[in-house]
Amino acid sequence: MHPSFQQADRVATDVVDAATEVLRHLGMGLLESVYERCLERELQLRGHTIERERQVTVDYKGERFTTLLRADLLVDGCVVVELKSIEGKLRYEHKMQVLSYMHLLDTPVGLIINFGATDDQRIHRVILRNANRD
């Protein structure tokens, strides 16, 4: 099991609750940047730490370098949150983007939240392979 999976699981549940509150308060149809800022504030009010950028180190064939990774939100250092405000279903690229962030940041859980979708398509949860297994 990933060392921070249990914490990430709890945090992810709170992120979903916070996103629901933001949507209830603002409604649909706004820009992604508005939802991002409001969700960040809602999570801060709930006691969470938010990062938008983080330096990561990449090792590739003997070369080691750092690069700045810009996830929409990194909550408590253990959950990557990618926000969208698009009509319809999420695309494969959205899921791969979150998985890439999760691998580089070593976070076990990611969420894609689409404020432009209907209830049954709004939230997609991503778990790193075997992160929730002993």
Image (spheres, grey):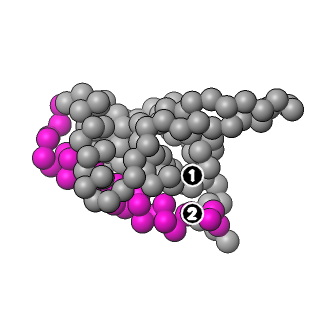
The residue that label 1 is drawn on is: 107
Q: Position of residue 57 (x, y in %)?
A: 68, 37
- Residue 28 colored in magenta in the image: yes
Nearest the camera: 6 or 54? Answer: 54
- Residue 126 colored in magenta in the image: no
Looking at the rendered structure, which numbered label has been put on residue 4?
2
> Where, by quadrant of the figure, is residue 13 drawn?
bottom left
Asked whether residue 88 is in view, the answer is: no
> Where, by quadrant of the figure, is residue 17 drawn?
bottom left
Residue at (14% x, 40% y) in the render = 27
Cβ atoms under marks 2 and 1 closer than 8 Å: yes
Q: What residue span does the magenta drawing correspond to?
A: 1-29
Rendered position, 87 above or below 48: above
Left or right of 92, for residue 128 = right
User: What residue type is disc 2 on?
Assistant: Ser
Left or right of 88, for residue 93 = right
Point out the tag, 2 or 1, that comes first from the N-terminus.
2
User: What residue type is disc 1 on?
Assistant: Thr
